[in-house]
Amino acid sequence: MRSKKLVLLAAGVGVSLAMTACGANQETPSGGSGQTQATGAGGIKVGVILPETATSARWEGFDKPMIEAAMKAEGLSPDIQNAQGDVQKFSTLADGMISQGVKVLVIAAINSEVGAAVAAKAKARGIPTIDYDRLNLGGSSEYYVSFDNVKVGELQGQGLATALKDKAGAQVIEIEGAPTDNNATLFYNGQQKVLKPLYDSGALKLVRSQPIDGWDNQKGGVTFEQILTANGGKVDGVVAANDGLAGAVITVLRKNGLNGKVPVTGQDATPDGLMAVLRGDQYMTVFKPIKAEAQGAAKLAAALAKGDTAAADKIASGSTDDTKSGRKVKSLLLEPKLTTKDGVKEVVSEGYVKATEICTGDLAAVCTQLGIS
């Protein structure tokens, strides 16, 4: 599903991503509709379209403010919009940005079909497109900025395998992401690198694996409950592809008196996900330093806006295989981190969430014990 040529956060890519706009991520994340135009005075116009707000808190809570800060630090004037899960709206937003003459378009598409269509329109107008976080299969974007998503899945698999290592034959249910999202496929592939040998050996037993259309948390919860009921209420571990789906799974486990007894995976290190980890309802999440992703996209956009493809190629020095078109996409891929209860302090220390957001009520004492402040 991917090229072996990855460029990781620790690798030299000819650009420092670690501290660019280091204070900027302290801006208060914006909520609401996500349609606020974030433009600076006098900078080169860049359009950014994010996919939705319903299934993950990351897009408005992390990506939007961090992209805005990083792009302004590069002298760009970002117009950041959110399609709210509406494919037609995504296309309309792109049309508007293209007609307004943005120099670069950065898209985290709802699905590959709309992403590829938007990239084709931009290309016809001579506007370079960067696939942000999600690769649009069959598209024409020449650049891709994301995390090593197979590695994300591997970390989820490793987390669950560790949690169940002393329970031979443990029964596992997998609640996966949207089948139309290439990232969901990559997460699954990574999980199976770890878990399939355990299923094959009988160390673990797979009850069922089910993708969830649109990453819909409500559907995820209903689907998990149906699988659990059909299995006689028995489950020992759950692969949930992100923190939103993990939360839906935990709600069902709580109804059945199983929360805190059944390890659940996740990803994105959202405030709700981290609180579930601290509470013991969720075994782990995957922390993806989104500030580095935002900074990488901003530096790449700045180079492309100036027509400096040599600089852009130096930043995106890896490659990812587009399995639909057979082409290789120039890529900057960053390293994710497995985060259990003991790792929550690092997420807070790096400014992705505030202690006041997660150390509330019954979790205040837990945070004190872990040195989170």
Image: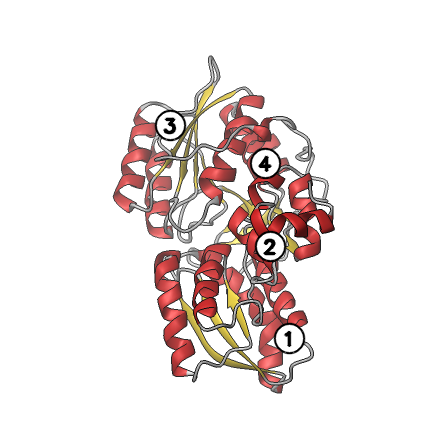
Give yes or no for contact between labels 4 and 1 (Cβ–Cβ under 8 Å).
no
Q: In which quarter of the image is the C terminus?
A: top right
Q: Is 211 on the left-hand or right-hand side of 147? A: left
Give coordinates of residue 178: x percent, y percent: 40, 60
Disc 2 crowd rating (10 Å Cα; few below 14, some 14-19, many 20+) is many
Front: mark 4 or 3: 3
Distance between the alpha carbons at the discs numbered 4 and 3: 22 Å
Which residue in the protein does label 2 denote? 286
Which residue in the protein does label 4 denote? 296
Q: In this view, does 115 lie above or below 198?
A: above
Per the image, label 3 sits on a secondary structure element best described as loop
- Looking at the rendered structure, the kind of residue marked 1 is Leu
Distance between the alpha carbons at the discs numbered 2 and 4: 19 Å
Q: In this view, does 315 lie above or below 166?
A: above
Give the residue displayed 50% in from the left and 22% down from the top: 76
Per the image, label 1 sits on a secondary structure element best described as loop
Which residue in the protein does label 3 denote? 36
Disc 4 crowd rating (10 Å Cα; few below 14, some 14-19, many 20+) is many
Between discs 1 and 2, the one toward the N terminus: 1
Between discs 1 and 3, the one toward the N terminus: 3
Tag count = 4
- Image quadrant assignment for residue 355: top right
Which residue in the protein does label 1 denote? 164
Between discs 4 and 1, the one toward the N terminus: 1
Between discs 4 and 3, the one toward the N terminus: 3
Front: mark 2 or 4: 2
Q: Decide if residue 227 is in sight here.
A: yes
- Looking at the rendered structure, the kind of residue marked 2 is Val
- Looking at the rendered structure, the kind of residue marked 4 is Gly
